[in-house]
Amino acid sequence: APHVGSTHTAITIARYLSNLGHMVALVEGNYSQDFERIHSLYEGEKSHIFHEKQFELNGIEHFKYRENQDLGEIFSLYEYVVLDLGVLSDTMYMDEFKRSHVKCVVCSSEEWKFHWIEQFQNSYGNDEHYNFLVPGASLRNIKDLKDRLDYHSVYALPMQETPYEPTKEAEEVLQDIIGEFINGNAKTFSKSTLILTSVISIAVTVFIGLVFWFLR
């Protein structure tokens, strides 16, 4: 759903990977036009710059939402591709979510919002690869959510002033979630491309999928 932090989290992941020295693309897979707004603010323009489909900012190549977007071409050019899918039921990239190896669900730990997590589980199951991320949660919130979900992959995502400057704490969380994929494939980037698909939201729950492919 809007305003729960999906794009913020996608940017944080992309910046984290960029800070590690990797070539990263951040693709908008939903029609929120957030990337149009980011681009306009960055360029100091008052209106959207629709004639440009991509822009570079802070070491990340941003690809704006386009119905005719060629993901295959993007996948072939970057080590990591972070895909901000928006509402999962509405995205045109549902297959990318299904193919992802690491799936993160951005959600709230508040009791009165837990039914959205239950709806997600009813619709998409409880894949052992799901990682639940709770922005700004306390350790008690995380423990309560782990107990309710009977699930251990629940993380507090620290609040940040800007996603383009991940805090040390945020980087440590991302290291726990995707570190094994980075370390395990670091020496093969010259021969293959690792694709990271990120950030999907559904109702008040946002899903972040990280897709890793090897392209020959």
Image (spheres, helix red, strand yellow):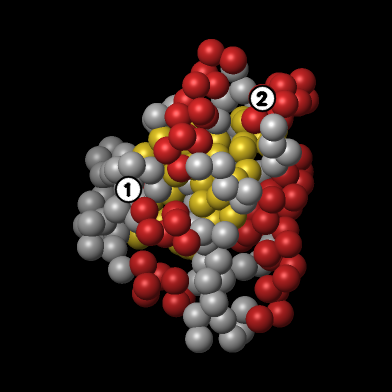
Q: Nearer the viewer, residue 10 or 202?
A: 202
* Pointers 2 and 1 in contact (C-beta within 8 Å): no
Left or right for 78, reference 182? left
Kind of residue at disc 2? Arg
| Vertical comparison of 47 with 118: above or below | below
Quick one: 197 or 114, which is closer to the camera?
Answer: 114
User: Which quadrant holds residue 101?
Assistant: bottom right
According to the picture, the residue beneath numbered tag 2 turns out to be 148
The vertical placement of 79 against 135, above or below, is: below
| Residue under numbered circle 1 | 91
**Relative to the observer, which residue lies in front, 68 or 115?**
115
**133 or 19: which is nearer to us?**
133
CA gap, disc 2 to disc 1? 29 Å
Horizontally, residue 66 falls left or right of residue 181, namely: left
Give the residue displayed 64% in from the left and 53% down from the top. 16
Q: Is residue 98 above or below residue 1?
A: below
Q: Farthest residue in the top direction?
A: 112
On-image quarter of the N terminus: top left
Q: Can residue 42 be seen in this snapshot?
A: no
Q: Secondary structure at mark 2?
A: helix
Mark 2 crowdedness (10 Å alpha carbons): few <14, some 14-19, many ≥20: few
